[in-house]
């Protein structure tokens, strides 16, 4: 057997294992992220999962998205969790969110009161491309398109009254990068008071002697829960939250995904013959303001605008709306803009240099494989096994893999892909991984890891932003 045949055989085994995980985690209505930790439906997980299932089970992909969108709020918001009413092993549960305080909340479905990055328009395009029954998939697109657009409109209005084309988040959980070091400074200004008694079930679910080291700290968790309490106090009223909330951040990853999703929403609109004007306006706003908010750097020596990569600090950063300044923490968020296609070729090259730099598992970094950790390896806040404070996550690597291909960096993209394959092959389809040892951490048989590995194995280029 040739090395090429051996590689193809190994990839077939990997593909079948990934498919088996998705099959096992399907509960008849939606796919749970992981049997060990997450018994409900999470919004951006559902989007990633629908991508993986679109290659072999279109009906599951469609049901995944439709189940999620059945829980859409009247104002367009897609909640970050749709609760399985039979499960009682997760905190905070549906009753804790008390969403009936809001006139916009669904009347009969338990959800959280916040949102997550809008991967779904991207997923729906995958469903169309991978479907063999185009009539069936177009019927689905016609049903889901108004709901997708309503969600995007919510993000571009209620979450962006500045009309910047960039999304404001009110909670770290809305970013998807729950305990990223990016949130340390904004969270430190939150004065926690009158916090209800609660028990963290995530520590029990993870299990093992190092469980507490792999998930967010109690200091962070207290603030996570307190922010939910404040949302309830203001009845989830978006205008009140925008005016009064102590945590308001324009987020790079969320805004980057929304920009890409709007590009795919345009593609869907073309397929079903819908007007493009409003979405084109959204895209234009993002294009005008992305650098203004996320790369607003100056050279202090001569008070002139600095170029991306001109020094160690000149990267993209989240923007704190309350402090009106960038949050200068070196994390994977600073590299995600390559996924958008909003960068010049010169700027993309700077991102590639950072990706291959020793700071981010490049040459001389002593990483297990050349995948990209969630935080710069050489900063004081890097923690190799703690959630979004250092470990490797497959979804962010998938975005960067697609971005590298968009800009023609195919060898660099292939290194990441092969690194991802090594992690799942030798350390399981886990939620995240130790960048030094490759050890799998967090949830086991993790659905979005399986789904995105399937997309990387198929490598059709469907998800490269138009």
Image (tube, rainbow, N blue to C red):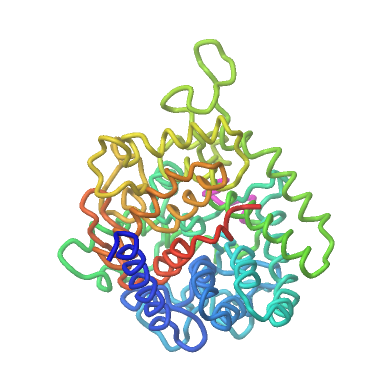
Quadrant for the N terminus in the image:
bottom left
Residue 39: name its quadrant: bottom left
Please report the residue visible at 40 percent of the width from the left and 62 percent of the height from the top: 195
Q: Position of residue 190 (x, y in %)?
A: 44, 48
Q: Position of residue 382 (x, y in %)?
A: 29, 43
Please report the residue visible at 52 percent of the width from the left and 17 percent of the height from the top: 299
Residue 412: name its quadrant: top left
Q: Position of residue 258 (x, y in %)?
A: 62, 54
Please say whether residue 132 is one of the residues in the magenta stretch.
no
Horizontal placement of 88 versus 273: left or right? left
Q: Position of residue 117 (x, y in %)?
A: 56, 59
Which of the pair 11/232 is nearer the observer?
11
Q: What segment carries the magenta color?
A: 241-250
Please say whether residue 248 is one of the residues in the magenta stretch.
yes
Position above or below: 335 against 6: above
Horizontal placement of 432 versus 326: left or right? left
Which of the pair 325/355 is nearer the observer?
355
Residue 68: name its quadrant: bottom right
Position above or below: 368 against 222: above
- Residue 301 seen in this snapshot: yes
Which of the pair 366/256 is nearer the observer?
366
Position above or below: 59 against 226: below
Please, which residue is most extreme toward the left here? 209
Which of the pair 412/365 is nearer the observer?
412
- Residue 182 seen in this snapshot: no
């Amino acid at each position: 057997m040739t090395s090429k045949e051996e590689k193809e055989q190994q990839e077939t085994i990997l593909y079948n294992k990934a498919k088996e995980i998705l099959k096992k985690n399907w509960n008849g209505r939606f796919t749970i992220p992981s049997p060990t930790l997450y018994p409900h439906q999470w919004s951006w997980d559902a989007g990633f999962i629908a991508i993986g299932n679109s290659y072999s089970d279109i009906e599951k992909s469609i049901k995944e998205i439709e189940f999620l969108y059945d829980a859409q709020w009247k104002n367009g918001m897609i909640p970050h969790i749709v609760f399985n009413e039979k499960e009682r092993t997760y905190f905070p549960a549906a009753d804790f969110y008390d969403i009936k305080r809001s006139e916009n909340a669904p009347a009969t479905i338990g959800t959280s009161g916040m949102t997550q990055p809008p991967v779904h328009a991207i997923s729906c395009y995958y469903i169309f491309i991978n479907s063999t029954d185009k009539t069936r998939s177009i019927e689905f697109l016609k049903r889901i398109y108004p709901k997708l657009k309503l969600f995007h409109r919510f993000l571009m209005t209620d979450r962006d009254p500045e009309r910047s084309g960039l999304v404001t988040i009110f909670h770290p959980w809305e970013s998807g990068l729950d305990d990223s070091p990016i949130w340390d400074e904004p969270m430190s200004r939150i004065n926690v008071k009158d916090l209800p008694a609660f028990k963290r079930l995530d520590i029990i679910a993870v299990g093992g002697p190092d469980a507490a080291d792999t998930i967010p700290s109690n200091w962070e968790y207290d603030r996570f829960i307190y922010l939910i309490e404040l949302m309830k106090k203001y009845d989830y009223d978006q205008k009140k939250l925008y005016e009064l909330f102590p945590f308001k951040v324009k987020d790079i990853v969320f805004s980057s995904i929304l920009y890409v999703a709007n590009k795919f929403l345009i593609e869907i609109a073309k397929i079903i013959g819908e007007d493009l004007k409003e979405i084109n306006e959204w895209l234009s706003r993002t294009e005008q303001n992305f650098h203004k908010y996320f790369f607003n750097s100056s050279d202090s020596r001569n008070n002139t605008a600095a170029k991306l990569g001109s020094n160690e600090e000149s990267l993209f950063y989240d923007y704190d709306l309350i402090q009106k300044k960038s949050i200068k923490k070196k994390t994977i968020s600073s590299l995600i803009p390559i996924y958008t296609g909003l960068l010049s070729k010169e700027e993309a090259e700077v991102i590639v240099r950072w990706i291959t730099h020793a700071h981010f598992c490049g040459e001389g970094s002593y990483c297990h494989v050349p995948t990209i950790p969630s935080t710069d390896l050489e900063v004081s806040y890097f923690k190799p096994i703690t959630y979004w404070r250092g470990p490797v996550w497959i979804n962010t690597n998938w975005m960067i893999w697609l971005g590298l291909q968009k800009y023609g960096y195919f060898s660099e993209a292939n290194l990441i892909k092969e690194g991802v394959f090594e992690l799942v092959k030798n350390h399981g389809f886990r939620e995240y991984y130790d960048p030094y040892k490759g050890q799998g951490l967090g949830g086991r048989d993790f659905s979005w890891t399986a789904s995105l590995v399937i997309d990387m194995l198929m490598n059709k280029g469907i998800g490269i932003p138009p």
